[in-house]
Amino acid sequence: MAPADADEGLDIHCRLDELLAERGMTLARLSEIVGVTVVNLSVLKNDRARAIRFSTLQAICDALDCEVGDLLVRRRAAEAT
């Protein structure tokens, strides 16, 4: 089965940086809690990830006490910074 085509002009943005700042937590500390390398979390944080395991997503949401929709949001490509 081929992957679905992305909606033109839309992409997924990871709000990891904002959530960490709101909670006063570092990427290194999150890495310790969830058992994922800082490098892999950085890829996610910088919107360069192509995929994420559900177990990783759940661990991040548990550690940050947030919902998946708080972490991953859709945005128009024009909003990308």
Image (cartoon, grey):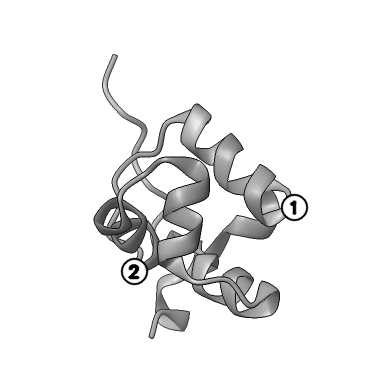
Q: Which residue matches tag 1?
A: 65
Taking the spot 42% from the left edge, 40% from the top edge, the residue there is 35
Q: Secondary structure at mark 2?
A: loop
Residue 46, image quadrant: bottom left
Q: Which residue matches tag 2?
A: 46
Give the numbered dot on residue 23. none
Upstream in the sequence, badge 2 or badge 1?
2
Q: Secondary structure at mark 1?
A: loop
Residue 76 lies, in percent from the top left, at 49, 71
Judging depth in this view, the residue of 23 and 2 nearest the camera is: 23
Q: Quadrant of the N terminus?
A: top left
* Residue that lies at the very extreme toward the top in this rendered image: 1
**Residue 13 sits above or below residue 40 on the image:** below
Q: Quadrant of the C terminus?
A: bottom left
Three-letter amino acid code at the position of disc 1: Asp
Residue 39, image quadrant: bottom left
Q: Is residue 72 left or right of residue 7?
A: right
Three-letter amino acid code at the position of disc 2: Asn
Front: mark 2 or 1: 1
Taking the spot 30% from the left edge, 49% from the top edge, the residue there is 37
